Image (cartoon, rainbow, N blue to C red):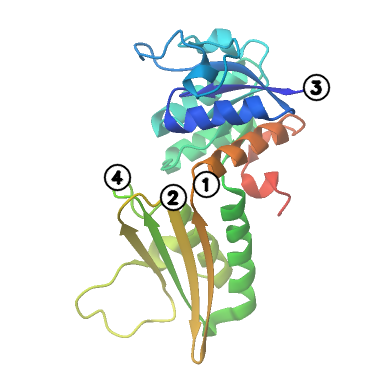
């Protein structure tokens, strides 16, 4: 039986990719498409808005109605909407996939509490399958190479991105800090200028680059005397994030209550 998904922000750039992906995947069914009240695409066929033949699912602002009979919602809308949307999904008996970036510690804690009360949630700063493999490999390499290797993270995104460093880079920093026995809050150095002095062993460099239309590049550098190891992921299309989110929705169909991330979805734990 197909997993029935409701796409939030269905008329947006990511929403359209999610709609198209759900319609093309035989293991999924599009159960609803949601936009905010006043959106000019309300009432239009979600597939047509996504550039496909009509599917019969119209974009609406009635989330409660769309959730009836659905299995999961996929939310890439706004950080402040993550918890209310997850609560609405849970109350309707649906799972929630949250791909929104820049979630605060308070929001993450609220999602954890909701999961403890029986919700099924996948929340990740990056839904890309490749990026989540990068997370896994970064932890593995950092532990194997040890303290002789200096660790630096470099990320690049388009010139319209609002946050820096990216949520993906922050997650990389957290993973690397944990693997190296460091603390993200105190041992990450965000760029360098002036005369910072020689690099210490108890630090991870974090560097954000902005320009053009770059979807998302992330590189982890392990540098020692005589050699350097680099792990790099480059996203050329936002479709990779949509594919990961749809995969997460299928994962949640059989998952017990809990707060998961893409490492769980991919079986990397």
Q: CA distance from mark 2 to mark 1?
A: 7 Å
Which residue is under mark 2? 167
Q: CA distance from mark 4 to mark 2?
A: 15 Å
Q: Residue 195: horizontal and vertical position, in percent?
A: 21, 81
The numbered mark, 1 or 3, whose residue comes first in the sequence reads 3
Q: CA distance from mark 4 to mark 1?
A: 18 Å
- Residue 8 in view (yes/no): yes
The numbered mark, 4 or 2, whose residue comes first in the sequence reads 4
The numbered mark, 2 or 3, whose residue comes first in the sequence reads 3
Q: Is residue 80 left or right of residue 52?
A: left
The quadrant the C terminus occupies is bottom right
Which residue is under mark 3? 1
Q: Regarding mark 1 in the picture, which secondary structure is present there? A: loop
Q: Residue 184: horizontal and vertical position, in percent?
A: 44, 62
The numbered mark, 4 or 3, whose residue comes first in the sequence reads 3
Q: Residue at x 41, y 34 (%)?
A: 79
Which residue is under mark 1? 126
């Amino acid at each position: 039986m197909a997993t029935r998904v409701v796409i939030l922000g269905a008329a947006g750039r990511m929403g359209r990719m999610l709609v198209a992906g759900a319609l093309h995947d035989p293991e999924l069914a599009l159960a609803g498409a949601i936009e905010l009240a006043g959106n000019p695409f309300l009432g239009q066929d979600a597939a047509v808005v996504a550039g496909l033949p009509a599917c019969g699912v119209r974009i609406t602002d009635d989330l409660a109605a769309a959730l009836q009979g659905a299995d999961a919602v996929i939310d890439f809308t706004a950080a402040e909407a993550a918890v209310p949307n997850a609560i609405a999904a849970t109350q309707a008996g649906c799972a929630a996939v949250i791909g929104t970036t820049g979630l605060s510690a308070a929001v993450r804690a609220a999602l954890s509490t909701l999961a403890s009360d029986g919700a099924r949630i996948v929340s990740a700063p990056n839904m890309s399958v490749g990026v989540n493999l990068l997370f896994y490999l970064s932890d593995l390499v950092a532990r194997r190479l040890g303290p002789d290797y200096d660790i630096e993270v470099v990320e690049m995104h388009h010139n319209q991105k609002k946050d820096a460093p990216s949520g993906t880079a922050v997650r990389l920093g957290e993973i690397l800090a944990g693997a190296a026995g460091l603390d993200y809050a105190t041992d990450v150095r965000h760029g360098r200028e002036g005369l910072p002095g020689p690099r210490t062993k108890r630090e991870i460099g974090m560097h954000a680059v902005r320009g053009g239309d770059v979807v998302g590049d992330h590189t982890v550098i392990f540098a020692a005397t005589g050699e350097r190891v680099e792990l790099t992921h480059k996203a050329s299309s936002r479709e990779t994030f949509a594919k990961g989110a749809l995969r997460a929705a299928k994962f949640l169909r059989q998952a017990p209550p809990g707060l998961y991330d893409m490492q769980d979805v991919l079986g990397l734990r």
